[in-house]
Image (cartoon, rainbow, N blue to C red):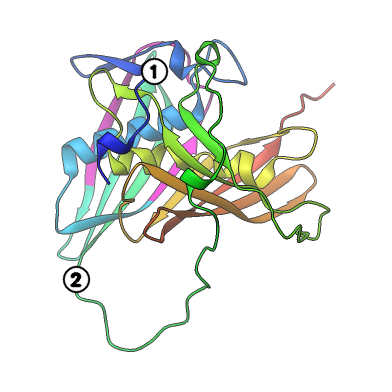
Amino acid sequence: MTDHDRAPALGTMFDREGDRFLPTPWTRSVWDPNSLRGPVVTGLIMHQVEERHADRDFQVSRVTIDMFRLAPMVPVTVRTEVVREGNRIRVVDVAAQAEGLDVARASVVMLRRTAPPEGRIWTPPSWDVPEPDRLPEPELVVERLPIWEQRTIPDEDERSSGAGEAPRRAWLRDVVEFVRGERPSPLVRAGLVADYANPFANGSDTGLHYINADATLYLHRDPVGPWIGITATTHHATSGVAIGSCALYDLVGPFGQTSVTSIANRRRP
């Protein structure tokens, strides 16, 4: 699949001015209208890692992003530094900054691609779900500034997850340019979806009451095509602290997973 399989672009997330990225209303957070959405911060980090450090011989295989604070709706700059450059592993430190403060820090691990070893290794069963073109097409309300088209995958056999509900599953397709004139690349789309482990794994029947302090994305290959499938695989919580994980797919098969640690979004009296 190519970019031609994507939904038409409804808008753009960032305008670029030199090394500064100027947010548009499409980046606005659901938690605070004066702040950026978490996914666009993770996407921006991946965008700059790819632009400055991409190497066809290396796979971006792990990205751990610590969210220090809500990023304000102001221009953002990204600083990167290679802290290890080995023959088989490279590590890049990244800082996203707004108003002179770090709003997020990341460690990016890249591993050299090579021939797979011999032998058979256990893997989970294939993800047996309807493809997105077999699911109802949602109505996109432009006024709500969506960055994804989401097609929810129903739990057809109504199996319980043990908590009274089945795990959330959906196909996502980007509908907005990342930087003006530029749709998200496969790596940037993977970065954008990393933050979605929080709502998919930690959401409840009354909404999302956890806010994530980080996101860790694991990739064994880049996603292919416009659709990314996501399914919750883990949720555990005690005393207002939660962990959640999701598996990531495209129409070819699995390509990675994403995990978060989160805190109950309640202010103390």
Q: Nearer the viewer, residue 237 or 116?
A: 116
Instruction: Answer left or right for 226 relative to 229.
Output: left
**Magenta stretch containing residue 64, yes or no?**
yes
Using the image, tell me which numbered label, if any, was put on residue 104. none
Q: Quadrant of residue 8?
A: top left
Q: Quadrant of residue 265?
A: top right
Q: Position of residue 149 (x, y in %)?
A: 49, 31
Q: Which residues are magenta?
A: 63-82
Residue under circle 1?
A: 10
Instruction: Answer left or right for 241 relative to 189.
Output: right
By secondary structure, the bulk of the magenta-drawn segment is best described as strand
Instruction: Answer left or right for 83 relative to 153.
Output: left
- Secondary structure category for the residue under label 2: loop
Q: Residue at x 50, y 16 (%)?
A: 145
**Magenta stretch containing residue 83, yes or no?**
no
Vertical relation: 72 (above or below) 201: above
Residue under circle 2?
A: 114
Q: Residue at x 40, y 53 (%)?
A: 250
Vertical relation: 74 (above or below) 172: above
Q: Residue at x 68, y 44 (%)?
A: 202
- Secondary structure category for the residue under label 1: loop
Quadrant the C terminus occupies: top right
Real-space CA distance between mark 1 and mark 2, rounded to the nearest whole angstrom: 39 Å
